[in-house]
Image (tube, rainbow, N blue to C red):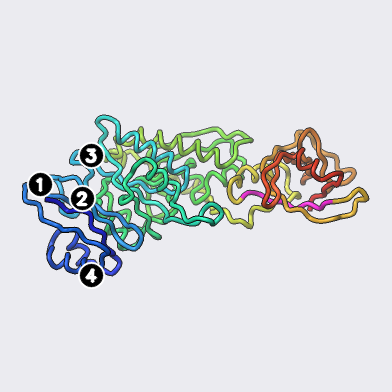
């Protein structure tokens, strides 16, 4: 005797009716109301034995999908809670981009190991969006990864905002002991943060309090730092300002790009999280976490497309760092004038600059200061302060990435000037 799958549209239900449905109170009235709002309803019978079955559910489209969950003893569970198993603590993971899947993979592996004290009870991620150049509406990379691993689609939650009442009702019913976030991409309100008794913990790819904000890795590379790291910190209402549980430092070489460094830092962050999970789950991490030094805090604001243009009046090292920092999205762009053999401008090319390095030789200010040359497979672009930038890979609009030598050969005797 159990609660079988019931699809319900929840947006029209009042909170009292919603709570009644969850708790199994006023069953006849609640089920009658649900019948007018659902696409399909299966027959429901109350449990006849000592144990009870608690419904687990997840937001899916405009409604909720209810399903039978593991039977738990009334002495260890309230009627509105969700427990994956009687012995494991439920953990809810929040993440969206590809790097978040690195953390989710580590949690899946740790939760399936013998004697694991926790289980991933649900995943919260950004809603499906247009991808593949806008051609298709697809789930977030984290959602797709979870589906590929066989995770129940009913337990993948995709609220537009983390403060939505229907989402918060769902989260409360899941009754997570702890929430873990990794590049989720949504602000978590106080109502959310009050739900997990052991707190919400974030993997942040910087050495907090440095580079708080949306783009810590990109801004660190743009600044040319030689060292960064990853921090494990409790989430509070203030931006990335919670107590730090643990951190790991990492050197940054002058060639690595932001997407690669992000992967490395979230990989290190995953290891840090798994190492600290025992203290997080027994509550001792809250005592050992250290407050951040507000006097040392710096910000890492979100990158905008308007920042992607290169200005060659800046020194080459600053431009090189910007190319590395903005790799992936939004990229870096520059305009060049195409000159014929008589040095007459023919047209203007907009190039996406993919890969660069700083020229080791200081150029002379004598001669053509705006002229671009090609040497040893690189476009040599004069920059501010007598420096020069070697451009190794470029991309024309709508074309594939090519190396500098192939691009130069395609000019067929024409030359370039920086603009």
Disc marking residue 36? 4
Which portion, as a residue range, is magenta?
A: 331-338
Q: Please say if the residues under marks 3 and 2 sit with CB atoms less than 8 Å apart.
A: no
How would you rate the neighbour count of disc 2 (Cα within 10 Å): few for under 14, some for 14-19, many for 20 or more? some
Q: Is residue 44 magenta?
A: no
Q: Is tag 2's residue or tag 1's residue first in the polypeptide sequence?
A: 1
Give how far apart the Cα atoms at labels 2 and 1 are. Answer: 13 Å
Q: Is tag 1's residue or tag 3's residue first in the polypeptide sequence?
A: 1
Disc marking residue 51? 1
Q: Please say if the residues under marks 1 and 3 sit with CB atoms less than 8 Å apart.
A: no
Secondary structure at numbered mark 1: loop
Secondary structure at numbered mark 3: loop
Secondary structure at numbered mark 4: loop
Looking at the rendered image, the disc whose residue lies closer to the viewer, 3 or 4, is: 4
Is residue 206 visible in the rendered image? The answer is yes
**Circle 3 is placed at which residue position?**
88
């Amino acid at each position: 005797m159990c609660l079988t799958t019931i699809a319900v549209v929840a947006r029209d239900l009042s909170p009292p009716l919603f709570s009644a449905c969850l708790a199994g109170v006023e069953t006849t009235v609640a089920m009658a109301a649900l019948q007018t709002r659902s696409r399909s309803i299966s027959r429901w019978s109350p449990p006849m034995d000592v144990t009870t079955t608690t419904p687990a559910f997840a937001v899916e489209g405009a409604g909720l999908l209810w399903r039978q969950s593991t039977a738990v003893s009334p002495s260890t569970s309230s009627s509105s809670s969700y427990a994956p198993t009687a012995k494991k603590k439920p953990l809810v993971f929040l993440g969206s981009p590809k790097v978040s899947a690195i953390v989710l993979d580590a949690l899946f592996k740790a939760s399936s190991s013998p004697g694991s004290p926790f289980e991933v009870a649900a995943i919260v991620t950004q809603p499906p969006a247009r991808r593949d150049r806008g051609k298709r509406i697809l789930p977030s990379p984290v959602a797709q990864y979870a589906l590929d691993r066989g995770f129940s689609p009913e337990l993948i939650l995709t609220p537009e905002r983390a403060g939505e009442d229907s989402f918060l009702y769902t989260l409360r019913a899941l009754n997570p002991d702890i929430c873990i976030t990794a590049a989720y991409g949504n602000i978590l309100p106080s109502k959310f943060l009050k739900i997990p008794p052991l707190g919400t913990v974030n993997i942040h790819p910087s050495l907090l309090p440095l580079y708080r904000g949306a783009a810590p890795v990109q801004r660190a590379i743009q600044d040319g730092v030689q060292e960064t790291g990853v921090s494990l910190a409790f989430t509070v209402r203030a931006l990335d300002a919670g107590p730090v549980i643990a951190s790991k430092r990492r050197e940054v070489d002058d060639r690595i790009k932001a997407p690669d460094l992000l992967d490395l830092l979230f990989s290190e962050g995953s290891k840090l999280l798994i190492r600290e999970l025992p203290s997080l789950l027994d509550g001792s991490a809250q005592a050992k976490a250290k407050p951040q030094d507000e006097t040392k805090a710096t910000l890492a604001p979100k990158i905008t497309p308007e920042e992607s243009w290169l200005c060659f009046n800046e020194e080459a090292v600053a431009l090189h760092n910007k190319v590395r920092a903005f790799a992936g999205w939004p990229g870096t762009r520059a305009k060049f004038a195409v000159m014929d053999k008589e040095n007459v401008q023919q047209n203007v090319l907009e190039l996406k600059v993919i890969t660069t390095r700083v020229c080791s030789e200081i150029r002379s200010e004598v001669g053509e200061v705006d002229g671009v040359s090609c040497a040893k497979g690189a476009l040599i672009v004069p920059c501010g302060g007598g420096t020069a930038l070697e451009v190794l890979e470029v991309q024309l609009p709508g074309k594939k990435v090519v190396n500098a030598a192939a691009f130069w050969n395609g000019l067929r005797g024409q030359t370039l000037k920086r603009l």
